[in-house]
Amino acid sequence: MATARTPAGLAAGTLGGIGESVPRPDGTLKVTGEFAYASDLWHEDMLWGCTLRSPHAHARILSTDVSGALATPGVYAVLTHADLPAATRYGLEIQDTPVLADGVVRYHGEPVALVAADHPETARRAAARIRVAYEELPVVHDEESATAPGAPLLHPGRDDSHAAHVPHPNIVHRQPVVRGDVAAARARAAVVVTGDYEVGMQDQAFLGPESGLAVPAEDGGVDLYIATQWLHADLRQIAPVLGLPEDKVRMTLSGVGGAFGGREDLSMQAHACLLALRTGKPVKMVYNRFESFFGHVHRHPARLHYEHGASGDGRLLYVKARIVLDGGAYASSSPAVVGNAASLAVGPYVVDAVDVEAVALYSNNPPCGAMRGFGAVQACFAYEAQMDRLADRLGLDPVEFRQRNAMAQGAVMPTGQVVDAPAPVAELLRRVKARPLPPERPWESAGGGPDVRALPGGLSNTTHGEGVVRGVGYAVGIKNVGFSEGFDDYSTARVRLETVAGQPVATVHTAMAEVGQGGVTVHAQIARTELGVTRVVLEPADTRVGSAGSTSASRQTYVTGGAVRHACHLVREEVLALGRARFGASHPAWAHAELLLEGGKVTTEAGEVLAALADVLEDEVIDVEREWRHRPTEPFDLRTGRGDGHVQYSFAAHRAVVDVDTELGLVKVVELACAQDVGKAMNPLAVAGQIQGGTTQGLGLAVMEEIVVSADGRVRNPSFTDYLIPTILDTPAIPVDILELADEHAPYGLRGAGEAPTLSATPAVVAAIRAATGLALGRVPVRPEHLTGT
Amino acid sequence: MRVNFTVNGRPRQADDVWEGESLLYVLRERLGLPGSKNACEQGECGSCTVRLDGVPVCACLVAAGQVEGREVVTVEGLATGEDGAELSVVQKAFTDAGAVQCGFCTPGLVVAADELIRRNPDPSDADIREALSGNLCRCTGYEMILDAVRLAAARAGEAG
């Protein structure tokens, strides 16, 4: 960084502010192993909780006998539905999820009973001694079986807000988006392409398993230390289950080992609290990986039918789409996923005639809800495949065809919402395309014999590259940022400024769940920039401060970042008022409104120092807690989908380069370049890390990741042996090109960044495999048998 | 049963160990060393990587009784100086290069990377990928982990 000489009497800038790649405040603790994750918690006299889960996808519980478990030495409590003290159901939006199964189990792995014991293995063995008699029931496993005449209803007698408008009670929510005259557009189309696509069920596969520690308190309440994405949403759901007022359930965020949407719903939170209150002892629950696969919702698997029409000169004329998402046994966030899939179904393109329908099913498959990309991932896989097929039919380059139809600022979404911030879709594509291509046949470039590590299949390969073909593919996507459809998506921040040992110190307190994304780094950067202090203390996230909303929807830098900035502005006003009272007479500049806090000093806009912060503050403590809101959104019209439903849009493009061993059906992604507009890179290193991580999860969906559910609703691969996520050998170089085109509506012009790269990575990789093989490949993940036809 | 072994250079003793317990459980729950992580408990993710007589292993796959009389190094044993105040070259490189996000994989990766650059002071990218292929990371996409190991190897080389 170039350093300018600072004239005497002028303030130096504040180090560690926004725009710098400031290191994580928790980095040292994490590399030394001292950082306390939820699964590391320990308490004197603590018990271990364990969950007994259903082996069936749909069954009636005829009887439950817990006597064998209770008689096991070391067991302190066994709980079933009959033992619940208060509310028996919970849910993010619709309270349809039993705390413990209430006479019926609706998916494989549904919690049926809980055990607390003095050793985790004792708890597991005792749980295995609970005798549950089941009568298996017919299983609903896809749209046809869910909506067939006489289909078993997952939730008869629904009274939720979607029940009145859905075409069938096994459909959670339906959202159409219609615009323009599709029939007329079809009549004018020179080229029409139809396709059917399928997306498998992806798992978040965060590495830190679900875990937490519930400690009963003397006042009859409970303290819960927990890994979650949203403390206050958990609190709102847990307190009624415990029959306690919310102020008796005190929650503190523990170390969180990743989330990616999988911690939006409750897992063991209420269970651990119930056991702790029953036994009067602290209870820790930690899922193992097997249980984790049953213990959280997954990405909705989807079937998508698309029809695109274009003019002979390569203009999109219409898009028809039908998107069927399988929500599984309970609603979770299915309604919002439907809203996203429907409103983002045509992608970042200008299309005047649109007829889209998205639905989510109730079925006896595992519940699905939030995962990075949230409904936009499934649509992007389909519409980008369609765009390639259209380009091919038109004889156009796939990037050129996309650029001709790319939206830009001022474009109108199919919902009627105007995109009133930069939308550099064509530019992102140009950037990834302009990159030099990586060398071909990389296994040969090392000199000497082939380095099999660079071949598809790596060290396990049995060829020397004879059947390896290269392919290149492109994709671009659009993701909304923040909670949509009229949700009151606020955040709260408390900021304190005081003098400690002669130095000004800012303390930032929010309930934001730091799940690895680096929000804590950015919040401290904001406080440094806004208050001109170097020392920033971050208080642990807990429910003593107001809600920060969820760490999801790419929203925390925007919304909680916005709340921290807002609170800092209010603190600054108080500092300046104090300064005017103390020093106003000494310098006329104090009368001006535009004074700054920089480098520990109050300065004029020109940089002239008026006073040191420490001198202004003396013994005063300025302490502000405030909520902050972004622009409001509107619900989508239930018939037309019209409405300004989204806060902000985020765009990323990928170019994938793959080598495919066409004989063995193996794919090696050689490079997966990404260009993304982030508005403002608050912390460039952290933003690049988000883009690379999101890209890799998209790669996983493209070629390896799927929870396999058999027709009877049973999960077949709940382990890291059988559910594969990319290793460092599966992951290529991921060059990242970051654009910073400010969104004037957002704090600092920033744009939520975490999810967009997960969208386009998947279709780009599959497009590259198609280019290499000539195969249609309408389903992800692409498996070896899809490539070899065996 | 009782198990006696050396952890990070210090002789340690664990009592009342059940025969089915893993080295990982004994480290985390009996010896107060939770740095080694429990992400899969079946040897697939590498989050519990420790060195057993110098060899990187998944502590979840080692029965506690197998370590009797042997030497274990965990992530807690990598930093040096008084109370571990000085990060090892690999630990420092992980924080500097942005290789840490949620950090759950980090202890295992740091132990594995530390072993790699001691064995191979100038690893190629292919060498790094091969050595770390048993350690899953879900956050970073591995690019900055590669950067960190390259940086650590370069700094270790400079330090001679």
Image: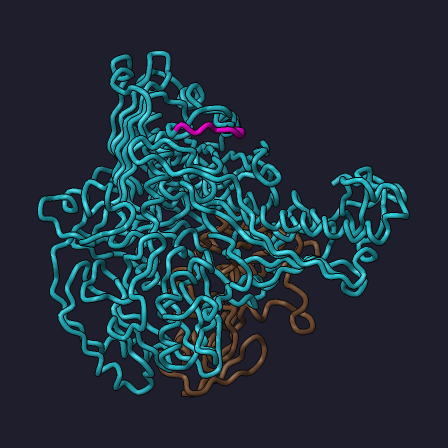
In the displayed structure, A529 sits above or below B89; it is above
- In the figure, residue A177 lies in which quadrant? top left
- In the figure, residue A507 lies in which quadrant? bottom right
Q: Position of residue B7 (x, y in %)?
A: 54, 77
**Which chain is tinted brown?**
B
Q: Nearer the viewer, residue A497 or A70?
A: A497
Q: Position of residue A644 (x, y in %)?
A: 43, 33
The color chain A is rendered in: cyan
* Residue found at x 35% / y 16%: A395
* Residue found at x 41% / y 76%: A283
On the rendered structure, is A61 left or right of A523?
A: left
Q: Nearer the viewer, residue A543 or B4?
A: A543
On-image quarter of the C terminus of chain A: top left
Q: Nearer the viewer, residue A174 or A78?
A: A174
Q: Position of residue A716 (x, y in %)?
A: 24, 56
* Residue found at x 78% / y 60%: A503
Q: Say whether residue A421 is magenta.
A: yes
- In the figure, residue A355 lies in which quadrant? top left
In the displayed structure, A571 sits above or below A692; it is below
Q: Main secondary structure of the magenta part?
A: loop
Q: Position of residue A571 (x, y in %)?
A: 69, 52
Q: Looking at this view, name the residue that lies furthest to the left.
A: A150
On-image quarter of the N terminus of chain A: top right
In the displayed structure, A583 sits above or below A212; it is above
On the rendered structure, is A527 left or right of A212?
A: right
Q: Say whether residue A336 is magenta.
A: no
* Residue found at x 52% / y 54%: A548
Q: Which residues are the magenta region?
A: A416-422
